[in-house]
């Protein structure tokens, strides 16, 4: 989260904290690509002020999974959605568990480049126990661990890039408190499992061939093509791919 004046932060927080209700009919209104309307309707969450973390174990059990199971978060900036994928105990592949609306993010399409640019990150990040924030300025938070190896290779700078509560952001993804509570409970259980953490794949948009072709004139087209390799690998296998950085580029190896 980039620094900004404290008085402005407090005034912005008061202004935008009540936006969630007005956004309820907008965020997550359309079904995800590749999903039927019925499936999307079942999994897509609507804005709520109700905390429902106690229901998570039962909801996961309904798909054969449990708290602490391997997990992948996929963030779609343009669509304002966070997908939660989990691995049931009896399967190698991951299953889409829930789709949360992003209440607010700052900046525009494109990666986080430097401290203070107000950009929300894009790329592939791995989260461990140290990145789980039980006590955040905005309720709970998950730290992207920015910069990753790719960001560092580009010379990108930034601190406190988070998925957090409330509906205000200065370089983060704000989910509202009830939704970040669920994400935190899911993430902390997985990150606490021995030798485990979880991936966050943050994309500018759903990376279909058509969507990327429509961005030929963007200065980020080459970077987004690297992200598409990771997107396609997971879309094909439903298993998070192996991702490393070589020569300042993401290298994706499908499982």
Image: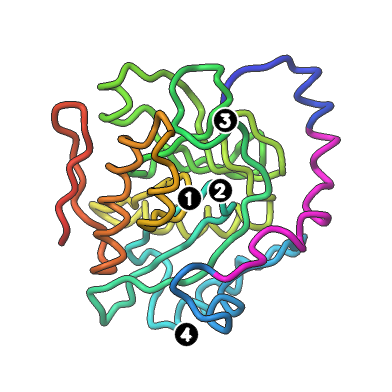
Which numbered disc covers residue 62?
A: 4
Mark 2: few/some/many CA within 10 Å (<14, 14-19, 20+): some
Secondary element under disc 4, as helix, strand or loop, is loop
Q: CA distance from mark 3 to mark 2?
A: 15 Å
Q: Which residue is mark 2?
A: 78
Q: Which residue is mark 1?
A: 205
| Residue drawn where x is 45% and y is 81% of the image | 61
Q: CA distance from mark 4 to mark 2?
A: 30 Å
Q: Earlier in the sequence, mark 4 or mark 2?
A: 4
Residue 76 among those drawn in magenta = no
Q: Earlier in the sequence, mark 2 or mark 1?
A: 2
Q: Earlier in the sequence, mark 4 or mark 1?
A: 4
123 or 177: nearer the viewer: 123
45 or 26: nearer the viewer: 26
**Residue 255: percent from the left, percent from the top?**
15, 62
Q: CA distance from mark 3 to mark 1?
A: 17 Å
**Residue 112: percent from the left, percent from the top?**
46, 28
Secondary element under disc 3, as helix, strand or loop, is loop
Determine whether label 2 and label 1 are within 8 Å by CB.
yes
């Amino acid at each position: 989260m980039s620094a900004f004046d404290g008085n402005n932060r407090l005034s912005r927080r008061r202004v935008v904290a009540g936006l969630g209700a007005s956004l309820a009919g907008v965020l997550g209104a359309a079904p995800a690509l590749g999903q039927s309307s019925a499936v999307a309707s079942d999994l897509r969450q609507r804005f709520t002020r109700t905390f429902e973390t106690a229901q998570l174990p039962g909801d996961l059990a309904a798909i054969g999974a449990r708290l602490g199971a391997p997990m992948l978060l996929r963030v779609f900036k343009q669509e304002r959605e966070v997908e939660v994928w989990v691995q049931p105990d009896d399967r190698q592949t991951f299953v889409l568990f829930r789709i949360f609306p992003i209440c607010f993010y700052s900046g525009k399409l494109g990666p986080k480049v430097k401290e203070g640019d107000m950009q929300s990150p894009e790329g592939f990040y791995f989260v461990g126990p140290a990145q789980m924030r039980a006590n955040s300025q905005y309720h709970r938070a998950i730290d992207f661990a920015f910069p990753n190896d790719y960001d560092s290779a580009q010379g990108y700078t930034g601190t406190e890039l988070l998925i957090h509560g409330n509906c205000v952001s200065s370089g983060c993804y704000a989910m509202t408190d009830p939704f970040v509570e669920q994400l935190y409970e899911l993430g902390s259980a997985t990150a606490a499992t021995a030798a485990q953490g979880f991936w966050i794949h943050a994309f500018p948009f759903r990376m279909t061939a058509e969507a990327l072709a429509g961005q030929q004139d963007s200065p980020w087209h080459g970077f987004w093509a690297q992200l598409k390799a990771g997107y396609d690998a997971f879309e094909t296998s439903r298993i998070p791919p192996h991702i490393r950085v070589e020569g300042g580029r993401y290298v994706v190896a499908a499982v």
